[in-house]
């Protein structure tokens, strides 16, 4: 695989990023991805107690990952989190090499983080947001479609419609995120202008991920129609279909406001599903590509299969779509 601007910018072997899943992206998972040649990403809340200290938890994770890898890694900092300013200070103090910001104005911290030595990527869900990130001086942009698990942009734009429009609008290197779980999605994203990809749900179904076994099992059992977007008056959120998602949709149909939905949800519902395995009352964030995931693998094997699959598909396309065994590649296989 030839290097891209993303792999060169982040000093990684493969332009493959692990999503910074809020409660799940801990040092163990991130180090496994980084050691395999991708970019592992830590979340400040990963594995944290329900009302724990985000900054202290992040500092613990940063200490652990440096014991587990000498390769580059990143930290995900949602700018709508309480203590987000303190989290930014913590990553600068720790000389974190890559920071991925989201859910806020990239102008607030991009320059400060870069002055601290970090490469800064910002997550966007529209062309307008991409322009704002570029003008704020971001080093690269993560283009996230509504297929992604968890919180999404208000316009709910699908990745493969949004990605080429962002590629036309900005010159920064792009990372595609949302609904990618195998090498076919990687090749497609590359064709549409991305120089890297980010996978979230696929890395939940790995041995290193601290997600509850019941949550991992639910992902493996999911079909194509088993995720849903809820909480549109608050923030569109893709989850597995559960009793909670049914209740949320009923509240929305009854005209519940964003504030009412927030009061109903309270705090820590995502933690309940993802760490405690409560798939009835918990919020099970999950991407739309869950139906493609059929096994729990080591994170390094996910990276290996992605890279090998990418090269095999690319070669078949360059060979005119003819497999060496004879049959033509189906039109939908690339």
Image (spheres, rainbow, N blue to C red):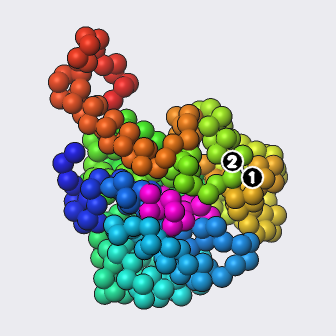
Any part of residue 303 in sight: yes
Residue 31 forms part of the magenta stretch: yes
Q: Nearer the viewer, residue 71 or 190?
A: 71
Question: For residue 291, what is the image quadrant?
Answer: top right
Say whether disc 2 or disc 1 marks the residue closer to the N-terminus. Answer: 2
Give the left or right position of residue 305, taking residue 219 as reference: left
Q: Which residues are magenta?
A: 19-32
Contact, mark 2 vs mark 1 (Cβ under 8 Å): yes
Q: Nearer the viewer, residue 83 or 92?
A: 92
Of all residues, the one furthest to the front in this rendering is 67
Residue 245 coordinates in the image, percent (x, y): 75, 49
SS for dot 2 = helix
Any part of residue 185 in sight: no
Quadrant of the rendering where the N terminus is positioned = top left
Q: Residue at x 67, y 41 (%)?
A: 217
Residue 183 coordinates in the image, percent (x, y): 37, 38
Q: Nearer the viewer, residue 140 or 235?
A: 140
Report the number of discs: 2
Give the left or right position of residue 254, taking residue 200 as reference: right
Residue 47 coordinates in the image, percent (x, y): 64, 67
Task: Answer few, some or many: residues within 10 Å of disc 2's Cα (few below 14, many 20 plus, some between 14 and 19).
Answer: some
Location of mark 1 (residue): 277
Q: Residue at x 35, y 69 (%)?
A: 70
Quadrant of the rendering where the C terminus is positioned = top left
Q: Residue at x 66, y 82 (%)?
A: 53
Location of mark 2 (residue): 213
Residue 171 coordinates in the image, percent (x, y): 23, 62
Q: Residue at x 33, y 21 (%)?
A: 331
């Amino acid at each position: 695989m030839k290097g891209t601007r993303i792999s060169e910018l982040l000093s990684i072997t493969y332009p493959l990023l692990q999503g910074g899943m809020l409660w799940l992206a801990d040092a163990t998972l991130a180090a496994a991805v980084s050691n395999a040649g991708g970019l592992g990403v830590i979340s400040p809340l990963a594995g944290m107690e329900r009302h724990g200290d985000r900054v202290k938890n992040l500092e613990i994770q940063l200490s652990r990952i440096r014991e587990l890898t000498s390769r580059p890694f990143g930290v995900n900092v949602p700018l709508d989190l309480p203590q987000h300013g303190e989290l930014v200070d913590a990553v600068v103090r720790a000389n974190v090499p890559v920071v991925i910001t989201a859910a806020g104005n990239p102008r607030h911290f991009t320059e400060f983080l870069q002055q601290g030595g970090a490469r800064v990527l910002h997550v966007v869900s529209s062309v307008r947001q991409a322009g704002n990130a570029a003008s704020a001086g971001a080093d690269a942009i993560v283009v996230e479609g509504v297929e992604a698990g968890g919180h999404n942009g208000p316009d709910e734009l699908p990745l493969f419609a949004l990605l080429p429009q962002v590629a036309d609008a900005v010159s920064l290197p792009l990372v595609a995120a949302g609904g990618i779980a195998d090498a076919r999605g990687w090749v497609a994203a590359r064709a549409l202008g991305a120089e890297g990809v980010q996978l979230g749900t696929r890395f939940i179904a790995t041995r290193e991920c601290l997600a509850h076994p019941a949550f991992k099992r639910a992902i493996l059992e999911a079909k194509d129609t088993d995720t849903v977007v809820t909480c549109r008056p608050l923030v569109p959120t893709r989850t597995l279909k559960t009793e909670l998602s049914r209740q949320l949709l009923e509240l929305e149909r009854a005209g519940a406001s964003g504030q009412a939905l927030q009061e109903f949800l309270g705090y820590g519902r995502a933690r309940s599903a993802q760490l405690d395995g409560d798939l009835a009352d918990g919020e099970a964030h999950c991407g739309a590509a869950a139906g493609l995931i059929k096994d729990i693998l080591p994170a390094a094997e996910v990276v290996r299969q992605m890279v090998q699959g990418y090269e095999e598909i690319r070669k078949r396309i360059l060979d005119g779509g003819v497999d060496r065994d004879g049959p033509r590649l189906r039109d939908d296989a690339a």
